[in-house]
Image (tube, helix red, strand yellow):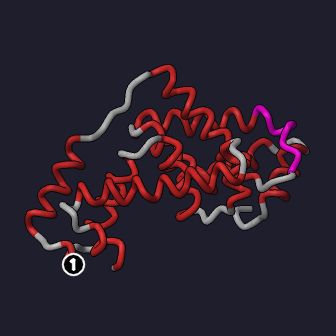
Amino acid sequence: MDNQSDKIVLKQIKQGDVSAYSVLVNRYRNMAFTLAASITKNNEDAEEVAQDAFVKAYKNLGSFKGKSKFSTWLYQIVYRTALSKMRIKKQQVQSIDEKTIVDVNLNDKQPDNLERSDRKKIIKIAINQLKEDESFLLILYYYQELSMEELAEATGYSVSNVKVKLHRARKNMYEQLQVLMNGQAKSLIQL
């Protein structure tokens, strides 16, 4: 059942096979968590947001018309759920341990010699320091390869607004990388 398209699985769910929903949860749980974490900046909150989003999606399957991909619709729910959580919490958490890891790695190695795992850590930290909507857009655009139209649908912004926000997010990401890499971000990006 895992290889079936989302449309087939959704049809099974609507026909009463509640267990088929687990296929969609398994298929999208990692990305839902990643997107939630990009906004909440906290793994526990991200886990809660992802779970809440899947529950909301299940309860509202009747309102899903299929005009977009299920994943895009789900990402919109994750986005809104995470923003609601952040409004309630009114705080952002940054992991001091991750910042320390970057400082240690940079002190030991030149930017050109950073290993792939070190680069991923640095990029993750930079993304976590961006505004919520910026990190959300970057993750969906670069990791999920969503189109501008799909990003607009997932966020509720217009396509032109998505383009502007994505441009600003890239610029801010570069600035964060410059800070983390002691002005050596170009070497990280070019590799």
Q: Nearer the viewer, residue 163 or 89?
A: 163
Please give the name of the residue rendered at 21% of the width and 78% of the height, measured from the top-left corner. Answer: 112
Left or right of residue 122, residue 161 in this image: right
Q: Which residues are magenta?
A: 59-66
Q: Which residue is mark 1?
A: 112
Residue 65 lies within the magenta run: yes
Residue 74 lies within the magenta run: no
Please give the name of the residue rendered at 70% of the width and 50% of the height, measured from the top-left corner. Answer: 152
Q: Quadrant of the C terminus?
A: bottom left
Please give the name of the residue rendered at 34% of the width and 53% of the height, measured from the top-left corner. Answer: 126
Residue 185 quadrant: bottom left
Q: Is residue 51 visible?
A: yes
Left or right of residue 42, residue 158 in this image: right
Residue 56, placed above or below residue 117: above
Left or right of residue 66, residue 158 in this image: left
Q: Is residue 23 visible?
A: no
